[in-house]
Each structure stands twice: as structure tokens, then as C-alpha cells.
Amino acid sequence: MDNLTELNPEQNSLSQDHLLQPSCQEAYRLCLMYEGQFAADDDKRWIRILACLLLYAHKDGARVYLANTIMCMKDEPAILVKLGQTFEQYVIFPCEFSLFPSWWWPFFSVD
């Protein structure tokens, strides 16, 4: 994953509508800050997952809950990275692979 560009709320049209809650704005800014500070691409990706979830969550309640969770862990960036990794592993990957027919699943097994 080369040349990650930071998420920019001014360039994202959804950010204006989705980040009306102050807690969501603060959590999103925190994700931007940590994304800029991390050196490892994996850490940046996992923080970016959290930021994208703040932008694209389907329910306002889920967005606010995630924002509050992020803010509770704002002084623990390693835990935020782990949270993003957990979302990727248990939410994003299963949804991605559920699009394939079941006979494809053995080809995507993770050992």
C-alpha cells in the first residue's frame, strides 16, 4: 500500500452531512491526526477504516457510538489500531467474501 493520501473532510462531500454531531467531528479529526502520524501502512489503513466508518455508517446511532468509542480511546492509539483491525477482520472481510459463491470459499481460507 504505497502513497496513502490522508482523508480530507473538505474534499469529501459526505463529511458535511454525516459529521454534524460534534463527537463525530472530533473523532474524525482524531483519526486524521493519527493517520498522519503513523509510519506503518497497516496502521494507517486500520485508522482509515475507522474514519470511513464515521463517514459511511448507515445509522446515526452507530456513527455516534463509534465516535464515542474512538474518543474514549483517544490517548491509546494502539487500541484504536486494534479496533480498526477488528472491524476489517470481522466485518469487512466476511462481507466481502460473502459476495462469492460458496464453492469459492476454500480458495480464500486464511491459515
Image (spheres, grey):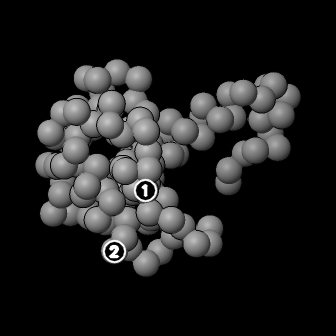
Residue 65: quadrant of the picture: top left
Q: For mark 1, does the 10 Å Cα neighbourhood hold few (<14), some (14 to 19), or many (20 or more) residues?
A: some
In which quadrant of the rendered image does the C terminus lie? Answer: bottom right
Which of the two residues, 46 or 54, is positioned nearer the viewer here? 54
| Residue type pointed to by label 2 | Gln
Q: Is 96 situated left or right of 50 in this image?
A: right
Q: Residue visible at 31% across and 56% down? A: 31
Please tell me which residue lies in front, 92 or 44: 44
Q: Position of residue 103 (x, y in %)?
A: 85, 28
Q: Is residue 10 above or below residue 19?
A: below
Three-letter residue code for mark 1: Leu
Is there CB contact under 8 Å for labels 2 and 1? Answer: no
Nearer the camera: disc 2 or disc 1: 1
Q: Quadrant of residue 22?
A: top left
Q: Position of residue 38 (x, y in %)?
A: 38, 73
Q: Secondary structure at mark 2?
A: helix
Q: Where residue 82 sits in the image (x, y, percent)?
A: 37, 56
Label drawn at residue 7: 1
Write down the residue under mark 2.
37
Left or right of residue 98, residue 60 in this image: left
Tell whether 51 sits left or right of 76.
right
Q: Is residue 86 visible?
A: no
